Image (cartoon, grey):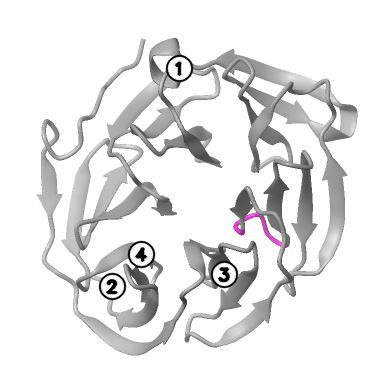
Amino acid sequence: MMRFLFIVFCLTPILALAQKDFTKLKSWKAKNTELLAVDRLGNFLFIEKSGRLVKYDADGKKIATSKKQATTLVEPWFLPTIFVYDRARQQYHLLDRHFEVSSTHILDSAWAIEPWLVCPTHDNRLWMLDRADWSIKKVLPVSNQVIQEFNLPIEITNKAEFIYLREYLNLVFLLDKNSGILVLNHLGQLIEHIEISGLKGFYFFGDEMYFVQNDTLKYFNLLTSQWREHAIPANSTQAIITDERLITLSANKVATLYKYTPE
């Protein structure tokens, strides 16, 4: 059984922090951008509708652009390479820092009937969501073994539209566009269900997971289950914060980079 069911902002107290002082550095049009991401070095990745990837450094300088490609899921934290999953071809690519393909790997058909989402793990395995039976499997590619497997609860998968899968701090995170973020342990136990519809993405900052809602960054501490929040510049539909930078994407697809002093 799950330990908690968090209905965000209704049943859970939130620790509000004073608004940070953000200094605008630059802004630019990013009209084709669908999603923002960040790598472990603090570089920002813009994922466009066409599958093109554009990378900017912490000062907003464009440093790499990829070709158009099929991108079901992109995971840039998997240094020194960037992980890109292509559902249609049931394969994933590992790109170097210049977005050149360093290797391509085809999924073994024995792993999953319908591999809907696939992401890398910290120990060079793969997590995959099999839409055929809504199971999540951990795979060891070098030996073609499924080393772990569990099924998601039927009450969750019944009306789900899963769009993102991620491992962090030995937990598995699954984003359902309709119901929010599922947090599971490696045995498949549902630890948290953060209910928020229409979310495009979420990110991590130390021991916290965060996302943007109503021009506010909402942080959930994965160790203490405490919430905190702070305001960000208005009209932000997506936002990523690093040690000294905040980048936002507005509803009309304008990217803005800010500098701030950590508290």
Instruction: Look at mark 4 in the image and give the residue it sits on.
Output: 239
Which callout, 2 or 1, points at the residue further toward the start of the chain?
A: 1
Cα gap from disc 3 to disc 4, whole angstroms? 17 Å
Distance of mark 4 from mark 2, alpha carbons?
Answer: 16 Å
Q: Secondary structure at mark 4?
A: strand
Label 3 neighbourhood size at 10 Å, few (<14), some (14-19), many (20+)? few
For marks 3 and 1, the one nearer the N-term is: 3
Q: How many marks?
A: 4
Q: Which secondary structure, mark 1?
A: loop
Mark 4 or mark 1, earlier in chain: 1
The span shown in magenta is 76-80
Residue that mark 3 sits on? 41
By secondary structure, the bulk of the magenta-drawn segment is best described as loop
Where is residue 190? Give x, y as percent. 41, 20
Residue beneath disc 1 = 189
Answer above or below: position of 22 versus 156: below
Labels 3 and 2: the sequence-earlier one: 3
Q: At 70% across and 36% down in the image, what residue appears?
A: 126
If you read the primary sequence from the N terminus, does the residue marked by circle 3 or circle 4 appear first? 3
Picture quarter containing residue 101? Answer: bottom right
Distance from disc 4 to disc 1, alpha carbons, whole Å, reads: 29 Å
For disc 2, the marked residue is 262
The quadrant where residue 56 appears: bottom right
User: Quarter of the image containing the N terminus?
Assistant: top left
- Amino acid carrying mark 2 in the image: Pro
Neighbour tally class for label 2: few under 14, some 14-19, many 20 plus, Cα within 10 Å: few
Residue 58: percent from left, percent from top: 49, 80
